[in-house]
Amino acid sequence: MNVNLNGKKVAVVGLGISNIAVIGYLLKHDLKRLSVFDTRMNPPYVDELPRGVDLNLGPLSADLLKSFDIIVVSPGISITIPELKAAAEAGVQIIGDIELFAFEAKAPVVGITGSNGKSTVTALVASMADCDGRCVAVGANFGVAVFDILSDKTELYVLELSSFELETTSSLQLAAGTILNVSEDHLDRYNGDIELYAKAKQRIFKHCCRIVVNRDDPRTIPADGRFYASFGADNSDYGREVTPEGVFLTKRGRRVFNCRELVICGSHNELNALAAMALADAVGISEKAQLEALRTFQGLEHRCQLVRVLDGVSFYNDSKATNVASAQAAIEGLCDRHQNGIILLAGGLGKGQDFSPLKQYLGSEVKKIFCFGRDADKLLALDPKYTKGVLNLRQALNEAFEIAKPGQAILLSPACASFDQFKGYEERGRIFVNLVTHLEHKEE
């Protein structure tokens, strides 16, 4: 598919951070018409619109959208809504910002998707490239719009790509790409069907030169079964060797890194490191640079981040855990470090997920779950003996600290989206960190 903008009527649907950057890009072309649409009456970033841009707020009109040649849709808006479906059926080209970026990027691109770990792997690959002396740019679902990082000086792009972004991307040429894992997430957008979700993820491989897969997850492997490298928990290809002396990361049986040197903790982060190394090898980043990055990488905010140790209790901010599998990874990653147990703070918008996989930890790794938010009742139903409902995050933290014993961890890993009580997972995490910071010692 080719995107020819000159002389075209273009609509931008959704005023998110990515489309604000797109509008600046579109204004550089000789368009016949440019209009911006948002269903919200007071959308974010509206003040950043250039003067004179045609802005339409409120319900979308299918008839009006059909009058355009191209619609650039925000990843937060499903292309299956009736107005966009009608436009597509009328022959309107529906794309996203990544599709436009595909025709402008001159440097090689690494693409990373998956239900969990993609931000960490994106940051790790970028850090490895930086340690190798390359001019690297990071963006897309990572929080920076791709048209804000586009530059002729860039030597390598590393993009975190969501399934939503991939739905509208057909032409992106990747030097290397991966699906890290596929677990229940965003099923409210995919009619409760994980296979539809996985199919959207698989679009990353359409024009990918070197494919990296998770050999323990069949949904990450392309339909033809061909790939450049695989990573996984065993000691083959990019793998892990578990010995009495510790855990080592390996490449085809060769020990390359002692996991004791990792700052980021947990077996899930060992897999993230393996995926990053495989992608780095795929684009020629030196092993020396890879190992330097692994030794120095501090991790990202809101991802199993140790906030504080108070009265022997460790507090972890894992607010980015917006699905069950991510919360499981955090629990399993911390349980060896906190053998006295974990007190879990969880809840929010469940996105149609099944919470039953968390039940296996109750009474063993997880001593108690304090449940809050709109779908708290679904967590409470796991086992009333080990769950308790509270009004909000503040109450959850205070009650958890009251019962916590030295050596235990209090883990905010909500397994849910945050939009019922917060603006996003970042705000939820910042509030948690602030609350933890102001906790006082227990009275003797």
Image (spheres, rainbow, N blue to C red):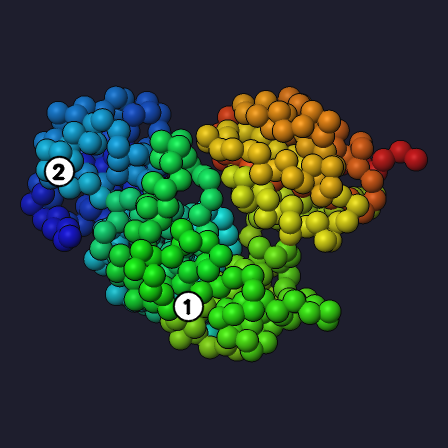
Q: Earlier in the sequence, mark 1 or mark 2?
A: 2
Horizontal relation, residue 32 to residue 39: left or right: left
According to the image, label 1 marks what residue? 229
Mark 1 is on which residue type? Ala
Residue 120 or 248: which is nearer the viewer? 248
Horizontal relation, residue 252 to residue 150: left or right: right
Element at label 1: strand
Horizontal relation, residue 117 to residue 267: left or right: left
Q: In which quarter of the image is residue 35?
A: top left
Horizontal relation, residue 146 to residue 253: left or right: left
Q: Position of residue 122 (x, y in %)?
A: 45, 58
Q: Can residue 154 be seen in this view?
A: no
Q: Position of residue 116 (x, y in %)?
A: 49, 48
Element at label 2: loop
Mark 2 is on which residue type? Val
Q: Which residue is drawn at 26% across and 57% down?
A: 206
According to the image, label 2 marks what residue? 92
Q: Residue at x 21, y 57 (%)?
A: 103
Q: Position of residue 204 (x, y in %)?
A: 32, 54
